[in-house]
Amino acid sequence: MSRHLAFYAAAQSVPEGRVATYGQIAEAAGFPRCARQVGQALSALPADTSVPWHRVVNAKGEISLRENAPNQRRLLEAEGVTFDARGKIDLARFSWLSAEEE
DNA sequence: CTAGTGACTGTTT
DNA sequence: AAAACAGCCACTA
């Protein structure tokens, strides 16, 4: 049993059209301060996974990936998440927890 | 066992 | 505001 599964469950808890930071996922999974492990866990996900890993972004609301970054951005846009000119998400509106109210 | 690394975060320059 | 530093935990060599 790995903590990865807890991270996956937390990631799946993120509703469509919303995003969560690695720290939030780690905390929700019961492993605060394990944001990096969330990244590693998600990096181990298969291509056909049902986990919405694309809804997980860093604390700046930006995509930390490199090769899959454009892909993730497209997936989020397909769910209604918008990016600004800098390629960042407005966490004040799309953040999974806190500050989701206008 | 020790050392290096990473899809991170918060504080300090 | 952007970059550098340090702290953090799990995995790999």
Image: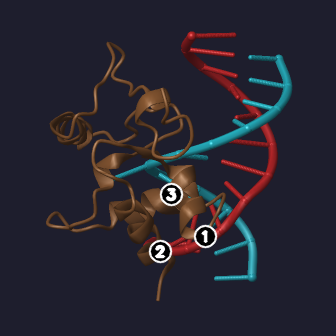
Chain colours: A brown, B cyan, C red
The quadrant in which residue A7 appears is: bottom left
Image mark for residue A30: 1
Question: Which residue carries the number 2 mark?
Answer: A6
Kind of residue indicated by mark 2: Ala
Residue A71: assigned label: none
Q: Identify the subunit bearing mark 2.
A: A
Q: Which residue is mark 3?
A: A25
At a point 22% along the width and 34% down the height, the residue shown is A80
Report if the CB atoms under discs 2 and 1 are less than 8 Å apart: yes
Mark 3 or mark 2: which comes first in sequence? 2
Identified by mark 3, the residue type is Ile
Residue drawn at 65 percent across, 61 percent down: A32
* Image x and y of residue A69, in percent: 27, 38
**Label 1 sits on what residue type?**
Gly
Query: Compared with residue A12, is residue A75 higher up or lower down, i.e. above or below?
Result: above
For marks 2 and 1, give the CA distance: 8 Å
- Say few, some or many: other residues with alpha carbon within 10 Å of mark 1 (under 14 / 14 to 19 / 20 or more): some
Q: Position of residue A74 (x, y in %)?
A: 17, 36
Q: Identify which residue, C5 or B4, lies in the foreground.
A: C5
- Between the residue at mark 3 and the residue at mark 2, the CA separation in whole angstroms equals 9 Å
Residue A25 at x, y percent in the picture: 50, 57
**Element marked by disc 3:** helix
Crowdedness of circle 3 by 10 Å Cα count: few (<14), some, many (20+)? many
